[in-house]
Image (cartoon, rainbow, N blue to C red):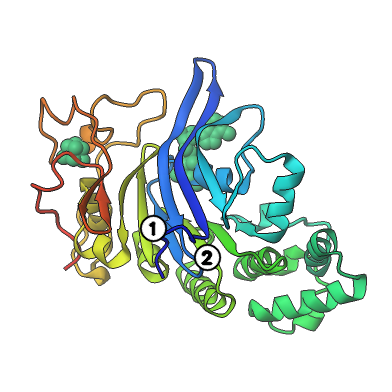
Amino acid sequence: MTGAGTDALLEVEGLAVEFATAQGWARVVDDVSFTIGHGETLGLLGESGCGKSVTSLAVMGLLPPRSSRIAAGSIRLAGRELRGLSESQLSDVRGNLVSMIFQEPMTSLDPAFRVGEQISSVLRRHRGTSRSGARERAVELLDLVGIPDAAQRVDDYPHTFSGGMRQRVMIAIALACEPDLLIADEPTTALDVTVQKQILELLADLQDRLGMGVLFVTHDMGVISQISDRVVVMYAGQVVEQASTEEVFWHPQHPYTEGLLACLPAEHGRERLRGIPGLVPGPLDLPGGCRFHPRCHHARAGLCDVTPPGLDEVHSGHRARCLLARDLELRGIS
Ligand SMILES: Nc1ncnc2c1ncn2[C@@H]1O[C@H](COP(=O)(O)OP(=O)(O)O)[C@@H](O)[C@H]1O
Ligand code: SF4
Ligand SMILES: [Mg+2]
């Protein structure tokens, strides 16, 4: 299913997020737009520091209130504008429409409470479920996410679970309120490859069964290829490429995406090449012209360092923020 059209589950439009710094407001997310359809998985991709988590937190209404602000744009979830909602309205949205899982389950789970209690408390708070009903549902949810012996494990504390099992518990908590949208921010990054694969399979299976939309955030192209229907690539706070997963992998239209693909290991169809030289610039030292130009080996002096590219449609459903997108023959996987 595509996210286009007015009945998209999530519509983020022209989102700009700023953080307070000693030098004034720094714009860390700039003019970001994307949609997610019901039952669709959108992969949000980019190196560390590109603005993926800040974008996700904005959608969740979880940006730090005093040190950050949404400077522009709108975030509509199931047709409802989230920007400008009060904290209690946002808490209601989080309890009913959207949930988030993070990279480090141990920092999100409370070590002092049994996992069953942590699931039950969500149900009791947001759904008004009775104590016994919530416990029963907690067992069902642990079972749903593949925790063996769920009826016994429901009374165990987080530290008795392995990293992969803790992430399953976090997913169970996130699913407790039957969200329409699940945001997964690097949920497998801390896990070893085998467990990572199991969690990705679990998420794909749950999405199939529950029909959720998923915003899947990762820096890992390999993970994106396994889970996403469409991909949004972010660089230095902006969207630089947007297309179906196949398009992004086979026919990338932005040199940054080409660079990320070149870092994939050989099993993905090519030998390992150099990474992308240099670092993502911070919001206060963005280069002029194209933000990627100091790292881009296709850059043209006098053009790329001068003119900021727009996010243009290169062909139907495929957008790229590159002045030379139509001229370059970029390498996808082959
Ligand atoms: N609480 C914060 N205060 C100030 N700057 C922040 C804060 N959180 C993130 N940033 C900045 O916003 C930018 C984007 O960060 P983030 O969204 O976490 O990147 P990603 O998730 O893509 O790694 C970075 O430059 C980061 O330093
Ligand atoms: S606009 Fe120029 S510097 Fe930027 S990505 Fe395209 S070729 Fe590279
Ligand atoms: Mg992040």
Left or right, 332 with reference to 68: left
Q: CA distance from mark 1 to mark 2?
A: 20 Å
Q: Earlier in the sequence, mark 1 or mark 2?
A: 2
> In percent of the image, x 50 and y 70: which residue is there?
39
Q: Is residue 188 visible?
A: no
Query: Which quadrant of the rendered structure holds the C terminus?
Result: bottom left
How many C-alpha atoms fall within 10 Å of the one at disc 2: few (<14), some, or many (≥20)?
Answer: many
Question: Disc 2 residue type?
Answer: Gly
Q: Which residue is mark 1?
A: 220
For the residue labelled by badge 2, is the local secondary structure a helix, a strand or a loop? strand
Residue drawn at the location 18% of the way across and 24% of the way down: 306
Under mark 1, the amino acid is: Asp
Give the x, y percent position of residue 75.
Answer: 54, 46
328 to the left or right of 54: left
Can the viewer see residue 70? yes
Q: What residue is at 82 percent from the left and 67 percent from the top?
A: 120
Res 146 → quadrant: bottom right
Furthest residue in direction right, as rendered: 131
Mark 2 highlights which residue?
213
Q: Locate the N terminus by quadrant.
A: bottom left
| Residue at disc 1, secondary structure | loop
